Image (tube, helix red, strand yellow):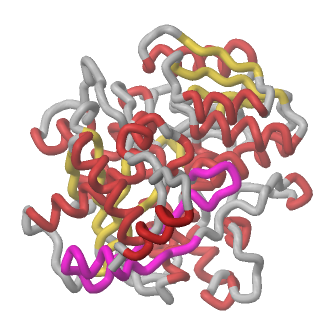
Amino acid sequence: MRCSKCGREYSVNSLAFRCLNCNEPLEVKYDYNFLKTVISKENFEDRIWSLWRYIELLPIEHKSKIISLNDGGTPLIKSTRLAEFLGLNKLYFKDESRNPTGSFKDRGSSVGVSKALEIGVKAVGCASTGNMAASLSAYANRAGLKCIILIPHKTPIEKVLQILFNEPIIMAVELPYPELYKMSFEMNRKFNVYLIHSDSPMRVEGQKTIAFEICEQMKWKVPDKIIVPTSSGGNFSAIWKGFKEFYEIGLIDKLPQMICVQSEGCAPIVKAFTEKTDLKPWPKPNTIAHSISNPNPLLASGKRVLRILNKANGLAITVSDKEIIEAQKLLAVKEGLFVEPASAASIAALIKLIRNGKINKDENIVCILTGTGLKDMEIVRKQVKAPIKIKTWNEFERILSQIG
């Protein structure tokens, strides 16, 4: 593992997750020149459609230690009605809600827990707004490892119930979210808990396979734009790493433009990028998109995201809660896809970018849908109408006769 900023190296089998020099996240590095000689597109043919089809580019030495719930292999859905509605020709959705626990977090949990088992640790842990905790606790159970979870005390009840059912050691912390991160760091340093949190190296390794799959699913044609809902920046960094690795070993011939999306109510990365200022904590986060509401990505991958955006001609954009709700509804009505508010942020951003003239109708565009709408039902309850009540057959027939 190598520091993403200063380059200091660490053993891939250590419990380290951030650089001791500059406190930046670590990244797993491979011998790409060697991989060029042993990996071709044909390598992946006839393999099981899961993230583990890319075993040569994952940091697990012993296949017997792999912990999987058939994660990854999610569909890339070509938009029909929404694309037509928006005037686009090539719009796709990478639907990560199809993972075992309902979000993209399962990719990182699978690789992270596999590595934890391989190096012989007894407990894994994370600080989470909900999705990661539900995922990690499930995979820890699959591996027979202890799991320690820290969540904000106002985490949506649907997510809490999913976590509780897995019976980890779970603490709801009545402190600002950045304090959960600091507590998780202490779990690692003082109690040897293996962190598989938002931007830990193994989580990034699992989540980079989103990019690998997109390349294969698009028959090795790289999208022009990838729109990613962004909180701490771990998934944004992971998807970029995936495209970069396929580019390094010659499987693709270009890289996509990466677009970072945050909510107007918590947008520290977008603010720093658009205003060309230092990354600073967001004072009072306030958004319905809980899964992308990290007020202090300085403790995670915020600086790494800024480096990627600056190096790769990236874009960063905010969307309002109103725009998120409208996009969530539009995606369901036009395409039949039910996602949580944080996922809908990618669609809201797409609409805003079209309005601002930043999207060409003939570009290949992929929106990342990070998690299922079943993760957060509070907003949905406020948007839906009650069923039509009927008491007689006559009422039933009258209603049907009025349908055009």
How many numbered discs?
Answer: 0
Residue 252, position as x, y percentages in the image: 45, 82
Q: Where residue 348 sits: x, y (%)?
A: 26, 55
Residue at figure coordinates x 43%, y 19% from the top left: 178
Q: Is residue 71 above or below residue 281?
A: below
Q: Could you say where residue 261 lies in the image, as x and y percent from the top left?
A: 29, 49
Q: Magenta includes 87? A: yes
Rendered position, 210 above or below 112: below
Please indicate whether residue 386 sits to the left or right of residue 249 in the image: left
Magenta-drawn segment? 75-103
| Image point (44%, 72%), residue name | 400
Left or right: residue 315 compared with residue 365: left
Task: Say above or below: 126 vs 301.
Answer: above
Seen in the image, is 341 located left or right of residue 158?
left
Q: Residue at x 10, y 39 (%)?
A: 275
Q: Quadrant of residue 172?
A: top right
